Amino acid sequence: MRYLLCLLALLTAPAAHAQDWTDGKTEVDLELILMVDVSRSMSPRELEIQRRGYAEALNSDEVFEAMQSGLLLRVALSYVEWAGWGAQRIIVDWRLLETREDLAAFSETLTSSFNPSLRRTSISGALLHARDSLEDNEFMGLRQVVDVSGDGPNNQGWEVLRARDEVIAEGIVINGLPLMTREGMGANWNIDDLDAYYRDCVIGGPGSFVIPVWDWDDFAAAVRRKLVLEMVSRPGPPDAPRIEKVVEDSTDCLVGEKMWRERNGAWMP
């Protein structure tokens, strides 16, 4: 009898522990928050291209198969547009995605209407908003990832390195999608090595990566590749653009703040 009682205790202990770990939240393979730049430097055409590019990628076979590769066969996803410090706009709040229909419904919400751009560029504000959103949502992921895109360096709010380090200290991975298309007002505030800036100043965490976009015609394909790498629960192919975190001496992580000060005579108002 004592043996049976001990066996019963061993069998029930993991379930109790798992319940404590989730704290009543829904378990998923991945919590992924998409932080998409809609600062004033983005043209209306660019804003629409981004929404439609994500919608196209989410409806692809590759993304669905990646979503189904995990232990739990489901992910939680949120889509947030950002600009200056404190300027974040939730377009699609956290949703549980398990089926093609879930992906299609998420995509439809993205393209049902389009909002105007916002002012300034605070990557640090976007990262901190994403961290808080991951903490406060109703899901518990085996992995947590922030996916941030943008067409220029940080120029408002906290220094980007400070925000990045706080986020990755929570075990959250940050990936980057630098937009190097040189269209609209972005050409006035962009930097030639934005991809290196994202690599050395923005991304972080195990397996973090950067996928630059050089032409808007390639945007949907870049997003699809990025989402597959983020959702897939097995090692990526050998050519996957995974980059170890190494800060180059030549990368100035305050370049955006310095540009703003030179042109406006003030330090990040």
Image (cartoon, helix red, strand yellow):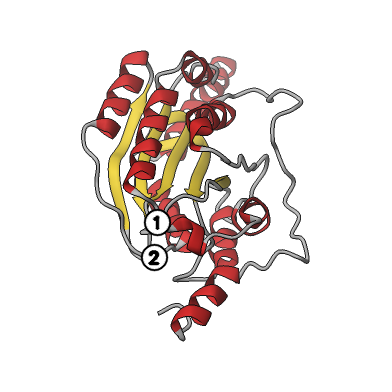
Determine if residue 74 is in view.
yes
Question: Quadrant location of the N terminus?
Answer: top right
Q: Quadrant of the C terminus?
A: bottom left
> Does 197 sit left or right of 269 as displayed?
right
Q: Which residue is pictured at 54% across the width and 69% down the height?
A: 256
Q: Position of residue 157 (x, y in %)?
A: 44, 71
- Give the left or right position of residue 90, taking residue 255 as reference: left
Q: Amino acid at mark 1?
A: His
Amino acid identity at mark 2: Arg
Q: Nearer the viewer, mark 1 or mark 2?
A: 2
**Label 1, on which residue?**
129
- Asked if residue 195 is positioned above or below residue 159 in the image, the reply reads above
> Horizontal and vertical percent for residue 149?
49, 47
Task: Tell me residue 170's x, y (percent).
Answer: 55, 53
Q: Residue at x 50, y 57 (%)?
A: 187
- Neighbour class for label 1 at 10 Å: few (<14), some, many (≥20)? many
In the image, taking residue 188 as reference, residue 55 lies left or right, namely left
